[in-house]
Amino acid sequence: MKIAIIVPMEIEAEYYRKYFHSGHKEMFGSTTFEHFCVNQNDVYIGLSGIGKVQAAMNLASLLSLVDIDLVFMTGTAGSLQDSVHKEDLILASAFAYHDAHNTLAGDYVEGQIPGEPALFNLDSTARSNFAQFLQKEKIDYQEGLIVTGDSFIGSQVQKDKIKQNFSTALGVEMEGAAFAQVAYHFEKPLIGLRAISDNGNQDANGDFDHFAQKVGAKAAKIICSYIEKMA
């Protein structure tokens, strides 16, 4: 099986390099992917960069040239709910764009890009298998909607505005819906696992640097363990 693991930032990728050894580097699009062989699986680990365009460009470049079977998207997110706390894990059930406002352009809902689904649902056998792994290993996680936009959310005002349109969203970040849109068009299963680094409010900027590396490593350790046990 060919597996892609993509994270936005270097501090979120460090753990994978410590865990997987003797990889060689290949360039896809504008980013370098490190290629490892793990339990007879080909694993491609790369940085997407930050934001929707970088995420879409680099995943599409990889999928255009390599017949990837499964995409893992991991990294950090900010909390949108009081029940979602720092260091919690969110297994995304769907992604949407919180900064897409096209209701005046036709019969569209908030978050929908014309010609695209209102939500990018991630239902797949691969995702179900991963969820069963989390449960078997007694790893605490929540499941739900994560929303994506090109702005870092660092105030209560920003949070409240997002929640007006996406009241049930658990987390907010800057790449997930773009990954999901690309995976949807390439017909590839996507597993999105985000770890909460901040509360998306006025304390987010200070919290992020402190927690991003810690929670990124937490998510990475789980994914690495899962891949090592895959048949």
Image (cartoon, rainbow, N blue to C red):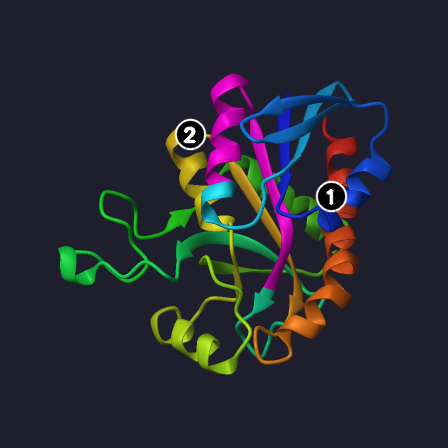
Callout 1 environment at 10 Å: few (<14), some (14 to 19), or many (20+)?
Answer: many
Q: Residue at label 1?
A: 13
Residue at the outermost front position = 30
Q: Nearer the viewer, mark 2 or mark 1?
A: 1
Secondary structure found at label 1: helix
Give the number of the disc on residue 187.
Answer: 2
Give the magenta range. 55-77
Which residue is drawn at the image coordinates 36% and 76% (left, top)?
A: 164
In the image, residue 68 sits, relative to residue 85, either above or below, namely: above
Q: Amino acid at mark 2?
A: Glu
**CA distance separating discs 2 and 1:** 25 Å
Q: Nearer the viewer, residue 171 or 53?
A: 53
State the image coordinates of residue 114 (x, y, percent, origin top left).
23, 47
**Image height of 7 relative to 30, above or below:** below
Point out the image quarter for the N terminus.
top right
* Apparent side of residue 39 relative to residue 93 in the rendered image (left or right): right
Where residue 209 sits in the image (x, y, percent)?
Answer: 73, 65
The structure residue drawn at horizontal position 54% and vertical position 26%, both measured from the top left corner, is 62
Residue drawn at 72 percent across, 60 percent down: 212
Pointer 2 or 1: first along the chain: 1
Amino acid found under the numbered disc labelled 1:
Ala
Splitting the image into 4 quarters, where does residue 160 fall? bottom left
